[in-house]
């Protein structure tokens, strides 16, 4: 029986993306323990390995203690020392976040200007696709649609720190995840996402600039694709997967900002930016 089967049995409500992430991290942990692949037993999850994990930077420590706990649950053999280590790492991570302290990884990935760097990049990309946006929707090529799509995705994430669910958004009101219009305003509904079991569906009105961008972008999507989703691959014109969208996002930001930003980092940037704004408002109220 493959390990992935055990993992899925131990986590029946986990999303597909979560299972892939857990498996990838467990494989990395197994490699740290000197294993070529994930074993089908729990003996490799030793106190010696845990001691090695405890010495890692906080972000990696949290990631690998989660991996260890998930693996042990898959084996049906939980170990208290790994559970305790995960709790300690999670508490330390929360404390760090509350202090708005950046981890080493975040310091390395932090772009000049923080979260606002994405808005500036969106403006730059918009200028670069203006000549495409002057063309009839049906006349553009797939590479041109991809260019416009890059602009829209950066614009979206410069205002909304959604996880990778943008790749699953449909352009009609159907399924679990979609965009829809109410009056003159545009909204996004995400009924199936990482935390949907605990927090329910996510439904919110899009930022004004994102709405304007969407109105420009949608006619091209409708004219050039038939898959019914918002995002499209460059070559085949098929629906873009979550993995490919995240890769596109990282590649654009690395090329233009010199920082390879994924949605997790963008969420950190957004949270920090919001916290700084709240703190500044509090200072003004005291003046």
Image (spheres, rainbow, N blue to C red):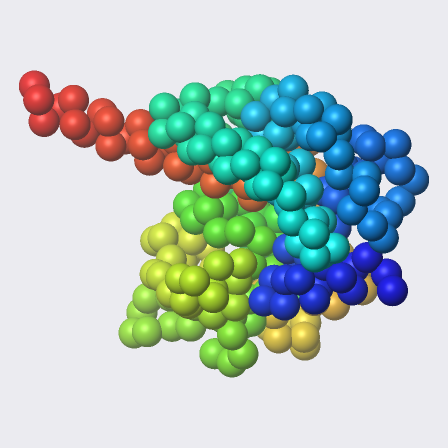
- Give the side of residue 117 with respect to residue 74, left or right: left
Whether residue 96 is visible, yes or no, is yes
* Residue 257: image location, x then y, percent: 60, 28
**In the shown orientation, is residue 237 left or right of residue 256?**
right
Is residue 259 in sight in this rendering?
no
Tell me where residue 166 sits by quadrant: bottom right
Q: Position of residue 237 (x, y in %)?
A: 75, 66
Looking at the image, which residue sits at the far right?
36
> Which quadrant of the view contains residue 8?
bottom right
Residue at (22% x, 25% y) in the render? 280
**58 left or right of 243 in image:** left
Decide: is 92 above or below 250.
above
Q: Does residue 253 lie above or below 198 as drawn? A: above
x 86%, y 48%: residue: 39
Compare residues 96 and 249 and report the one nearer the observer: 96
Which residue is depicted at the point 24% across and 32% down? 278
């Amino acid at each position: 029986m493959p390990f992935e089967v055990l993992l899925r049995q131990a986590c029946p409500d986990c999303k597909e993306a979560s299972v892939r992430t857990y498996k990838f991290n467990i494989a990395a942990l197994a490699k740290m323990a000197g294993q070529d692949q994930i074993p089908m037993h729990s003996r490799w999850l030793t106190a010696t390995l845990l001691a090695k994990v405890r010495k890692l930077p906080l972000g990696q420590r949290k990631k690998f203690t989660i991996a260890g706990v998930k693996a042990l649950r898959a084996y049906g053999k939980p170990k208290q020392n790994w559970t305790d280590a995960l709790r300690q790492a999670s508490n330390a991570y929360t404390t760090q976040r509350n202090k708005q302290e950046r981890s080493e990884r975040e310091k390395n990935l932090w772009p000049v200007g923080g979260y606002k760097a994405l808005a500036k990049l969106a403006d730059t990309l918009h200028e670069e696709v203006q000549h495409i946006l002057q063309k009839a929707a049906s006349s553009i090529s797939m590479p041109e649609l991809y260019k416009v799509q890059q602009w829209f995705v950066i614009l979206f994430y410069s205002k909304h720190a959604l996880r990778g669910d943008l790749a699953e958004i449909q352009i009609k009101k159907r399924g679990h995840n979609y965009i829809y219009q109410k009056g003159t305003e545009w909204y996004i509904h995400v009924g199936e996402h990482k935390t949907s079991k605990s927090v329910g569906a996510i439904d919110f009105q899009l930022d004004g600039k994102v709405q304007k961008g969407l109105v420009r972008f949608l006619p091209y999507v409708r004219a050039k694709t038939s898959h019914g989703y918002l995002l499209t691959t460059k070559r085949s014109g098929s629906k873009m997967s979550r993995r490919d969208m995240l890769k596109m996002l990282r590649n654009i930001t690395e090329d233009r900002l010199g920082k390879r930003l994924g949605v997790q980092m963008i969420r950190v940037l957004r949270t920090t930016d919001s916290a700084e704004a709240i703190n500044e408002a509090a200072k003004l109220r005291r003046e």
